[in-house]
């Protein structure tokens, strides 16, 4: 698959995948008016084919697709390269939302939703996916390294496969070692939201632990601070989840 770096300016390519033609048409119309180049797909195989032909900067992906569901589509796309994903769920069921986040979705929107809100979510995810200026420099601690300009993270010299939110979350922790960070603060500073479902933070921390901890079941680096949130401690000798 051809890979194109994501960017947040108007003209970014967004792939909308939804089997409901009315929803797809409305979403496409709003994104088009916002300045995005929009592709549409009505099912999983079509989405994969369109992504192969023109690699998107972001995918708006319905969870409940006929045949191949949105989770499988997301897995297969991620197997070809990093791409931001906003998952659409038909229900407000927490299990659906968490499952989408677990397989790597960067955000989710529950149907019925405001198309304007979805456009704002797209802008937010793409803005955070944009490479930072080279002057941002690198962050290093406990064998972990973050290169903002390249949007690259490594552990002991080995590159980590992080989603956009996981990268930003790790960068925030590395910038704030030893400090207890509330989930609300992480939601605000990493996601850019003043309110939202805090389980989003919990799921992303769990996913990040799975990639940076030697034993994710007994995390040493990203520790839970009960009743508060999390603390990144590069010098900890032990920690409990």
Image (tube, grey):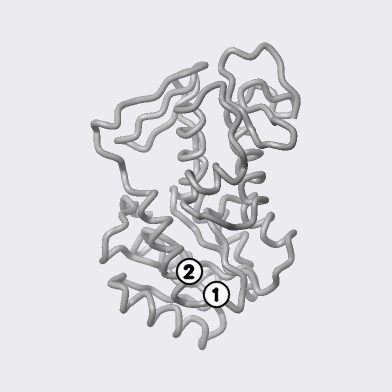
Residue 196 higher or lower than 239, as above or below = below
Q: Secondary structure at mark 1?
A: loop
Residue at figure coordinates x 51%, y 86% from the top left: 21
- The answer to whether the residue labelled 2 contacts the one labelled 1, judged by CB atoms less than 8 Å apart, is yes
Name the residue that disc number 1 marks.
43
Residue 147 higher or lower than 195, as above or below = above
Q: Nearer the viewer, residue 171 or 59?
A: 171
Label 2 and label 1: CA atoms lie apart by 6 Å
Q: Nearer the viewer, residue 41 or 97?
A: 97
In x, y percent, where is residue 173?
51, 30
Residue at figure coordinates x 35%, y 73% from the top left: 38
In x, y percent, where is residue 152?
39, 34
- Quadrant housing the C terminus: top right
Q: Is residue 173 left or right of residue 222?
A: left
In x, y percent, where is residue 180?
61, 29
Residue 31 higher or lower than 130, as above or below = below
Residue 52: quadrant of the picture: bottom left
Name the residue that disc number 2 marks.
47
- Quadrant housing the N terminus: bottom left
Q: Is residue 204 left or right of residue 25?
A: right
In x, y percent, where is residue 163?
49, 45
Residue 68: quadrant of the picture: bottom right
């Amino acid at each position: 698959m051809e890979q194109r770096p994501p960017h947040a300016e108007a003209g970014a390519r967004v792939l909308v995948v939804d089997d409901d033609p009315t929803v797809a048409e409305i979403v496409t119309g709003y994104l088009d008016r916002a300045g995005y180049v929009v592709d549409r797909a009505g099912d999983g195989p079509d989405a994969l084919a369109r992504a192969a032909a023109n690699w998107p900067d972001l995918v708006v992906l319905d969870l409940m697709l006929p045949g191949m569901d949105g989770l499988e589509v997301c897995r297969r796309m991620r197997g070809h390269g990093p791409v931001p994903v906003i998952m659409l769920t038909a229900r407000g069921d927490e299990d659906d939302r968490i499952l989408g986040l677990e397989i790597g979705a960067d955000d989710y929107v529950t149907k019925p939703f405001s198309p304007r809100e979805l456009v704002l979510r797209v802008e937010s995810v793409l803005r955070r996916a944009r490479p930072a200026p080279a002057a941002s420099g690198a962050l290093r601690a406990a064998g972990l390294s973050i290169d903002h300009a390249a949007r690259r993270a490594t552990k002991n010299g080995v590159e980590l496969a992080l989603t956009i939110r996981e990268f930003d979350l790790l960068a925030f922790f590395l910038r704030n070692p030893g400090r207890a960070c509330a989930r609300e603060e992480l939601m605000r500073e990493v996601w850019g939201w003043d309110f939202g479902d805090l389980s989003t933070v919990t799921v992303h921390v769990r996913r990040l632990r799975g990639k940076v901890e030697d034993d994710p079941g007994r995390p040493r680096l990203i520790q839970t601070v009960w009743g508060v949130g999390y603390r990144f401690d590069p010098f900890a000798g032990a920690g409990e989840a």
